[in-house]
Amino acid sequence: DGMGIEHCSDEKQRYMALRLRMFDDGYARLDSTWNMRDVCSPYTRLYYVYDGEGWVNSPSGEHKLRAGRMYLIPSGLKFDYRCDDRLDKLYMHVVLEMPDGFDMLGSFGDVLEMDMPDGLGAEILAAHRGKDMASAFRMKGCVMDTIAQFMEAYGAGLMPISSYSPLISAAFRLIKRDLSSRLTLKEIADALDINPSTLGKRFRAETGASVSDYIDSLLMQKLQRRLLSSDATLAEISDELGFCDQFYMSRYFKKRQHETPSAYRRRLGGAV
């Protein structure tokens, strides 16, 4: 008798290739000073509420944060938040990165909520407070379990993961690896040993965007994340991302975000 092997479907394999990135986490005991308008994050927020109550206002209306519930606020959503008295919650800033570098959870498009499954709240809080590698892995597992719960409940709201050709997949990897404001279509094409015009046409046909627009989107996303999740100076971030200087980077950022990098960091840097 031959050995039988069952393989995952192509669609399931694409989902398994997603990369979970965690930018920040913390247990917050909040009061009425937790109050901010026009928050729009380059990562998805997960809230696990343990006590008290608060509110998140999104374009669809007001969402009450209640003890025993967990919430997902997708990246790219503009929202306000507030607490009138007390709110105790564990928060996570995460991205479920697709092959193109963007956050899959951003396609939910609105605040999601559901009851915390029995035991999950205690397990993830214990993992968060642990200091060893095992705790870090347990916490990551809890976050993946949370995302799976939301996908099962609201998965119809997610965009399917596109299947890209080997050429465009290779272009994604190269652009993410060498991401810089100076990166050009010709440099990418030369690295892939293909004519720049051919690469540009095939990239647009598969993604719906030009190579330059795609680079610009990834660059802005990385710039926002660096401002909010690191203590690097503007000069250091500018150098890292290939801008000629921090003043040019500031003009680039303000043109797209309508505020300076410094103002953006001051306003949202402490938002939990």
Image (tube, rainbow, N blue to C red):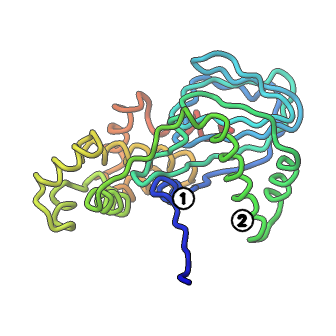
Question: Which residue is depicted at the point 17% across and 61% down?
Answer: 189
Query: Which sits in the foreground, 99 or 37?
Result: 99
Q: Is 185 situated above or below 135?
A: above
Residue that label 2 marks: 137
Residue sitting at the far front: 1
Quadrant containing the N terminus in the rendered view: bottom right
Residue sitting at the far bottom: 1
What's the amino acid at mark 1? Met
Residue that label 1 marks: 16
Task: Report the disc number at residue 249.
Answer: none
Res 73 → quadrant: top right
Quadrant containing the C terminus in the rendered view: top right
Q: Position of residue 174 (x, y in %)?
A: 32, 63
Q: Position of residue 102 (x, y in %)?
A: 45, 46
What's the amino acid at mark 2? Phe
Which secondary structure, mark 2?
Answer: helix
Q: Position of residue 59 (x, y in %)?
A: 57, 18
Q: Is 35 situated above or below 232?
A: above
Which secondary structure, mark 1?
Answer: helix
Res 55 → quadrant: top right
Question: Which residue is depicted at the point 12% across and 53% down?
Answer: 198
